[in-house]
Amino acid sequence: MKTITEIKGNWNEAKGKLKQQFAMLTDNDLLLVEGKQDELIGRLQIKLGKTKEEIRKIISEL
């Protein structure tokens, strides 16, 4: 299972896949700032109504 840190190198590709899967996500929702991965997870939790574990699983499966 990949972590956000591991996927960071391909984040643009991952963002595109997330936007395809969840059309309501915006670039601001998917903004990955160095050292602030928890903020990204929090934004996605609110927007998608999922748990932190569910969000991490979705990202790891990209």
Image (cartoon, grey):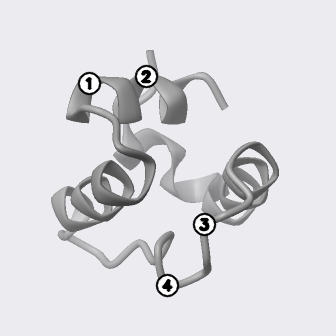
* Circle 3 SS class: loop
Mark 1 vs 4: CB contact within 8 A: no
Q: Nearer the viewer, mark 1 or mark 3?
A: 3
State the image coordinates of residue 40 (x, y, percent, origin top left).
Answer: 31, 63
Q: Is residue 36 above or below residue 16?
A: below
Residue tagged 4: 28
Q: Amino acid at mark 1?
A: Glu
Tag 3 residue:
25
Residue 55 rendering spot, x and y as whole percentages: 38, 35
Residue under pointer 1: 53
**Label 1 vs 4, first from the N-terminus:** 4
Please report whichever mark, 4 or 2, sits nearer to the chain's N-terminal start.
4
Callout 3, which amino acid? Leu
| Label 1 secondary element | helix
Kindly identify which residue carries mark 2: 57
Looking at this view, name the residue that lies furthest to the top: 1
Amino acid at dot 4:
Asn
* Horizontal side of residue 18 vs 31, given as left or right: right
Ranked by sequence position, the earlier of labels 3 and 2 is: 3
Q: Residue 1: name its quadrant.
A: top left
- How far is mark 1 from mark 4, CA to CA? 21 Å
Q: Which residue is more in the foreground, 49 or 43?
A: 49
Crowdedness near tag 1: few (<14), some (14–19) or many (≥20) residues, C-alpha within 10 Å: few
10 vs 1: above or below: below
Using the numbered discs, state the Cα–Cα distance from disc 4 to disc 2 in whole angstroms.
Answer: 21 Å
Is the residue marked by circle 3 packed among few (<14), some (14-19), or many (20+) residues within 10 Å? some
Figure quadrant of the C terminus: top right
* Between marks 3 and 2 in the image, the one whose residue lies nearer the viewer: 3
Rounded to the nearest whole Å, what is the CA distance between mark 1 and mark 3? 18 Å
